[in-house]
Image (cartoon, rainbow, N blue to C red):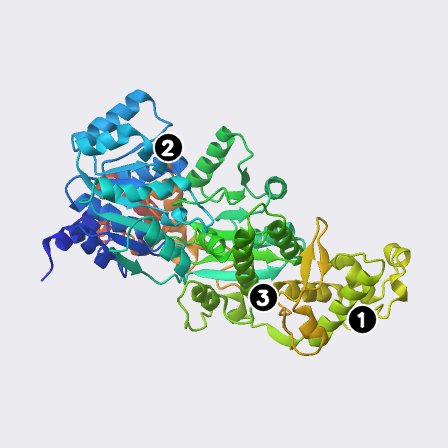
Amino acid sequence: MTSPGVQDAADVLKRVFGYDSFRPGQQEIVDHVVAGGDALVLMPTGGGKSLCYQIPALVRPGVGVVISPLIALMQDQVDALRALGVRAAFLNSTQSPAERRDVEQAFVSGDLDLLYLAPERLQLDGTTRLFDQGKVALFAIDEAHCVSQWGHDFRKDYLLLSALHERWPEVPRIALTATATEATHAEITERLGLGEARHFVASFDRPNIQYRIVPKNSPQKQLLDLLRTEHKGDAAIVYCLSRASVERTAEFLVANGVPAVPYHAGLDARVRAENQARFLREDGLTVVATIAFGMGIDKPDVRLVAHLDLPKSIEGYYQETGRAGRDGLPSTAWMAYGLNDVVQQRKMINGSDGDLAFRRQQTIHLDAMLALCETVTCRRSQLLAYFGQGGAAECGNCDTCLTPPESWDGTIAAQKLLSAVYRLKNERNQKFGAGQIIDVLLGKETEKVRQYRHDQLTVFGVGAELSEPEWRGVVRQLLAQGLLGVEGDYGTLVLTEASGEVLGRRREVRMRREPARAAKPARSAKSGGTAVDLPEEAKPLFERLRAWRAATAKELGLPAYVIFHDATLREFANRRPTSLADLAGVSGVGENKLSKYGEQIIEVVAQEVAEEG
């Protein structure tokens, strides 16, 4: 028999959020927390983590307190809940003293359902007193991987959160993250004191995301082509390694007719806030950013996440690509990757101020990222295996599945290149980068080759069987496999201990050969992704509904997705509801939104039908 808590939870799910049933894994978590149990939840972005604490907060007596790392996004999170009729508020440094007093009074009097605050606020005595004066339903610790010192988003203030259980042992805690290897999982457990909690680990698979990694060849132009042919009019996030690259890429896109804004820590705080607000509220905008952008972004209709530089770790890559397609609709994770990425990342690690253990850990992270780039097998399977979820079948929705690359015996090519590195170093003990070594292998009589008399070496011209791009691929893959090293400020190539195994013919080197043609996308190239898979007759109504949503959102000063998600608009376009009863049956339409927008939706549908008739 269903317990009263779960029955209440199911009612809240339908009445407030407009969903008939929980997603896989959600109900068990909700049931456990409603009953007062602690939980650690590992669930992919877009998997429905928020409901796992929002619904228990609405069911249990008291106010759910949510620890969230990003002040800049609290307003949008609160707006989205208020649009559902939930009494939500936040406390942070952006508010006036009077605004904070009003929120605190609402908390004490029980006039709130959810209260958001940053972890830094827990250091204030006033916050502790506030919690003692009111009733806390639960503590939700969002983005819990921030507690991990080996993680990519470490926040020292998260280390203080273990004190919550010591001070309020009767209040259940739920910690949630979308990014955790087994090691990070263990560290979260230890640092937050969740050893006795129930651990819920969902599949990290995001089947709606198509993973694609391509060789760099004028990456800005490659990105522009992708945006024009496959993601025209779609929201997109583009990640770059440096602030300068962010600025250049954003300017390039705007100059070529793609609406885009930059985002990085070097921008004025007001400009950053404006650009983030535009991205959240406007349809079809591209934000070009460093990794300073993204954590906590709830925009569900991002159709493309692109990387123009190699991420430092799979955790970072997964977290960033996970911002695509949170609504479950087809989306793309695309990366352009080249030799200079590998050289740059190796140099950054070697030049790091961290101790040996830190540099070793960073090297492990980078090696795993390189292995994902160079794999000849299913990328999704390898990604899942990294998070301890091995054994997945080929997905059929990544580039290596859609257009399988060949592997080839690159042992002789590796021996030639390593020999060239050795020979060039022996000349006056000087070291050179990839460009000079490849010129020597190809027999190019450049000024620099003649200057150093490299045309006199036995390795000069021995590599004519491969082209320059192919040799760059050889260098890249030798670096990825640890058979070649990088040192110095100029990225000079050096042999490693493992190089001798290849030169001594004791090790075979298998390499990836890029397919002649890129993988064909599984999406339409003619329209934005939001209309894909809709019947032709439904697309005009869908676009009319999007226009209504944009106008309504602008009038209310809200992000468009707070009104309705694309998935809900698609269902409106397919069903063509003619009454409030019809609308009530659509997923994502709760009581508050039905009351607020129902008549307007019916009118929009009627207008479209009348024009068609």
Name the N-terminal-most of marks 1 and 3: 3
- When asked about the image quadrant of residue 157, the answer is top left
Disc 3 element: helix
Which residue shows up at 78% across the image and 57% down it?
431
Going by the numbered disc 3, the residue's amino acid type is Glu
Q: Badge 1 is on which residue?
A: 464
Q: Secondary structure at mark 1?
A: loop
Q: Which mark is residue 374?
A: 3
Q: Amino acid at mark 2?
A: Gly
Amino acid, disc 1: Ala
Q: For this rendering, which residue is in front, 581 or 292? A: 292
Q: Nearer the viewer, mark 3 or mark 2?
A: 3
Q: Residues within 10 Å of mark 2 (few under 14, many from 20)?
A: few
Q: Is residue 90 left or right of residue 61?
A: right
Looking at the image, residue 169 sits to the left or right of residue 230; the answer is left
Q: Is residue 601 visible?
A: no
**Looking at the image, residue 479 lies above or below residue 392:** above
Q: Which residue is mark 2?
A: 557
In the image, 416 versus 537, the foreground residue is 416
Q: N-terminal of the two: label 1 or label 2? A: 1
